[in-house]
Image: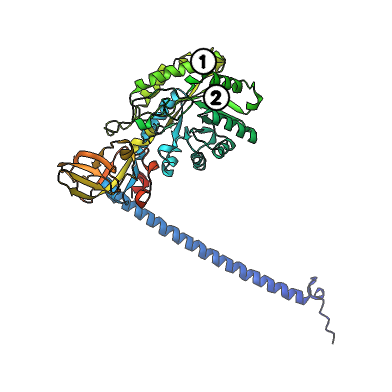
């Protein structure tokens, strides 16, 4: 018998053999099942997705409805929802503060650098990024790195500090920050060496110590010649101006990578008496004049920070006097008024400020719980769960932050008592306020320590092996 497969051509004119035809049909069958299976699966997936969407939508609507119907939580309820002690930042006040500041700054093309040392809470910094005009003032390589990783632009970062290491300077130069403010001749040489090594150009300003002591706490004065800050040029004028001349006009090619742009001052912090700035303005005019005599013009005048806040009556004066502060400089630095089309080949001086305290102090509270009210022989002590490790300003500078009981709206009691309000740390300086008269307190009451947004959380420590204090934005406590 002839087993040769029949030529299919003889039946249907096709070129396939029967076997091939069988295989093809089988394949088609499989494809059909595959498509049908796929379609069923797709229908099932779509159905599941639809159901899930509906359920979550319903749930969301339910939640929203519940939220809408729910009585808003009182401040006390909100503040009780987190474990004390912690810092609490009021974004409404912060927004009001920053908007007031930036509106004023814009008018005179003033550049604002937030002084990171006053508060480096990540969420506060995120909030600042809503205002793209804000740059950062750093005093360590760590701060420069942190500012960059937090998303602040490199060309809005200034870097001061008397003890910058080579590693820190190299990092800042490599990252191309806007300006390094040098505080000694030694640092200047170091900066130059590093710029030459990296073959990178760098803007720099010189921090001058004008020998002016403002009226503030001794520990936060930085502008008198007794302090370690800046170059006290009154006693080394020639050396200073000769060096700047060499750099500015590039008469010494060794300094070709350095770009001298101007001067930096910061005479102290928590200054409320603006007349303290008048002798500073006179000195600034003198220095600008001396530079101009040598045909050196500056484009950058960094006046540091220093604007004080009202720690005594924070509720009465929540927004610092930015206008008075700027106006003091703008009207008393006479060189600024000379700036016009004919001044110094049209060179304009841009004012920069590095504000810390004034931007954040009044927007922060330290929230704490009363652990005990201890009745002593001659006085009563309120012992809080917050200590000097959480807010060191009272222990370190004798600073007084106003303290208030957080009251429920139904709490109409107005009985007062006088306490030494203290923390739990084993140090006799762990005292927030002595002989302080306030609403009567009981165990478990909540208190707020006011004006604590600046140099509060950033100076906290783990002393007594305590947990590092947390910081929350108000919106985190809303629900
Ligand atoms: N720029 C430089 C170079 C500074 O040294 C400081 C603060 C500022 C700007 C920001 O100053 P502000 O605007 O905050 O006044 N821990 C102390 C304050 C120390 C200030 C140190 N320098 C306190 O709690 O009062």
Instruction: Establish if 218 lies above or below 141.
Output: above
Q: For the residues marked 2 and 1, what is the alpha-carbon distance in whole angstroms?
A: 15 Å
How far across and how far down the image is residue 280, in percent?
Answer: 41, 20
How far across and how far down the image is residue 472, in percent?
Answer: 37, 46
Looking at this view, name the residue that lies furthest to the right.
Answer: 2
How far across and how far down the image is residue 301, in percent?
Answer: 49, 23
Give the residue number, with chain letter if any, for mark 2.
Answer: 261
Residue 457, numbered label: none
Give the residue number, with chain letter if any, for mark 1.
Answer: 290
Res. 73 in view: no
Ligand 1 occupies quarter: top left
Tag 2, which secondary structure? strand
Image quadrant assignment for residue 328? top left
How far across and how far down the image is residue 346, in percent?
Answer: 55, 16
Res. 354 in view: yes
Front-most of residues 411 and 222 = 222
Tag 1, which secondary structure? helix
Here the colouring is rainbow
Instruction: Establish if 354 lies above or below 246.
Output: below
Front-most of residues 64 and 174 = 174
């Amino acid at each position: 018998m002839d087993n040769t497969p029949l030529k299919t051509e003889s039946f249907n004119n096709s070129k396939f053999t029967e076997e091939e035809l069988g295989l093809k049909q089988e394949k088609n069958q499989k494809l059909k099942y595959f498509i049908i299976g796929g379609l069923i699966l797709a229908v099932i997936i779509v159905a599941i997705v639809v159901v899930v969407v509906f359920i979550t939508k319903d749930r969301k609507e339910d939640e929203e409805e519940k939220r809408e119907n729910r009585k808003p939580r009182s401040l006390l309820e909100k503040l009780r929802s987190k474990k004390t002690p912690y810092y609490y930042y009021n974004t409404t006040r912060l927004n009001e503060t920053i908007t007031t500041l930036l509106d004023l700054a814009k008018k005179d093309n003033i550049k604002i650098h937030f002084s990171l040392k006053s508060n480096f809470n990540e969420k506060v910094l995120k909030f600042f990024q809503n205002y793209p005009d804000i740059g950062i003032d750093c005093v360590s390589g760590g701060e420069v790195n942190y500012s960059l990783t937090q998303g602040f632009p490199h060309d809005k970062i200034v870097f001061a500090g008397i003890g910058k290491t080579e590693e820190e300077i190299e990092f800042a130069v490599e990252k191309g920050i806007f300006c390094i403010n040098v505080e000694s001749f030694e640092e200047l040489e170091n900066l130059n060496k590093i710029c030459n090594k990296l073959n990178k150009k760098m803007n720099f300003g010189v921090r001058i110590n004008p020998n002016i002591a403002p009226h503030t706490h001794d520990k936060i004065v930085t502008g008198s010649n007794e302090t370690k800050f800046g170059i006290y040029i009154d006693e080394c004028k020639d050396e200073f101006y000769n060096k700047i001349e060499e750099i500015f006009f590039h008469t010494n090619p060794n300094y070709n990578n350095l770009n001298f742009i101007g001067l930096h001052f910061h005479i102290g912090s928590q200054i409320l008496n603006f007349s303290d700035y008048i002798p500073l303005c006179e000195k600034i005019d003198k220095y600008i004049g001396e530079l101009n005599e040598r045909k050196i013009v500056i484009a950058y005048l960094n006046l540091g920070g220093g604007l004080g806040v009202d720690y005594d009556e924070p509720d009465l004066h929540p927004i610092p006097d930015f206008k008075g502060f700027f106006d003091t400089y703008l009207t008393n630095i006479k060189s600024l008024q000379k700036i016009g089309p004919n001044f110094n080949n049209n060179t304009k001086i841009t004012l920069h400020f590095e504000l810390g305290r004034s931007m954040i102090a009044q927007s922060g509270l330290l929230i704490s719980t009363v652990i005990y009210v201890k009745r002593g022989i001659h006085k009563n002590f309120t012992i809080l769960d917050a200590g000097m490790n959480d807010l060191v300003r009272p222990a370190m500078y004798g600073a007084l932050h106003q303290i208030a009981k957080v009251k429920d709206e139904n709490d109409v009691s107005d009985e007062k008592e006088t306490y030494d309000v203290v923390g739990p740390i084993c140090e006799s300086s762990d005292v927030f306020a002595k002989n302080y008269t306030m609403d009567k307190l009981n165990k478990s009451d909540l208190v707020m320590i006011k004006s604590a947004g600046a140099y509060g959380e950033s100076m906290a420590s783990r002393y007594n092996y305590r947990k590092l204090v947390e910081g929350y934005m108000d919106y985190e406590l809303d629900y």
